[in-house]
Amino acid sequence: QVQLVESGGGSVQSGGSLTLSCAASGFTNTRYSMGWFRQAPGKEREGVAALVSDSDDSTSYADSVKGRFTISLDKAKDTMYLQMNSLKEEDTAMYYCAAVNIANSEPSLPPWLLLNQEAYGYWGQGTQVTVSS
């Protein structure tokens, strides 16, 4: 059973920075995809950024965060990070970590699927990010 634990959320002023962490455990295969999703009050959950564990070049970002957010992975620790800079009020949301384990016989998630929440089977409890003016 894969478990995901997020941390690093908090309150920050507009223009500030935060770094979220997601520590994963329980992967049965060495290959996986992980992503960050967020849900603001009254809105649907949306993909923010995602990556695959076996490719340094395979990442995907939502247009709204490109150039401001950076996703990374410490594979030795199975921990994913989201560095968020130049935060805006519209970034306020509950941020969730998600993961899917990939069997060795299966292809990695293609870039166009990385931000699709239906591709992920494991979810964390979420961490709140609040950006104020």
Image (spheres, helix red, strand yellow):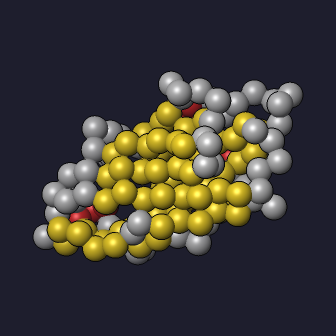
Residue 67 visible, this angle: yes
Q: Residue at x 70, y 63 (%)?
A: 3
Q: Residue at x 75, y 45 (%)?
A: 101
Q: Quadrant of residue 129?
A: bottom left
45 horizontally vs 42: left or right: right
- In the rendered image, the residue lying farthest to the front is 76
Query: In the figure, 11 relative to 27: above or below?
Result: below
Q: Residue at x 23, y 65 (%)?
A: 89
> 2 and 120: which one is in front?
2
Q: Quadrant of residue 63?
A: top left
Question: x, y (%) of residue 133?
Answer: 13, 70
- Numbered disc total: 0
- Quarter of the image that includes the N terminus: bottom right
> 132 and 75: which one is in front?
75
Query: In the figure, 2 relative to 114: above or below?
Result: below
Question: x, y (%) of residue 28?
Answer: 83, 48
Query: In the figure, 54 relative to 95: above or below?
Result: above
Q: Quadrant of residue 104?
A: top right
- In the rendered image, the residue lying farthest to the left is 133
Residue 117 visible, this angle: no
Query: In the figure, 105 relative to 90: above or below?
Result: above
- In the rendered image, the residue lying farthest to the right is 105
Question: x, y (%) of residue 103?
Answer: 83, 36
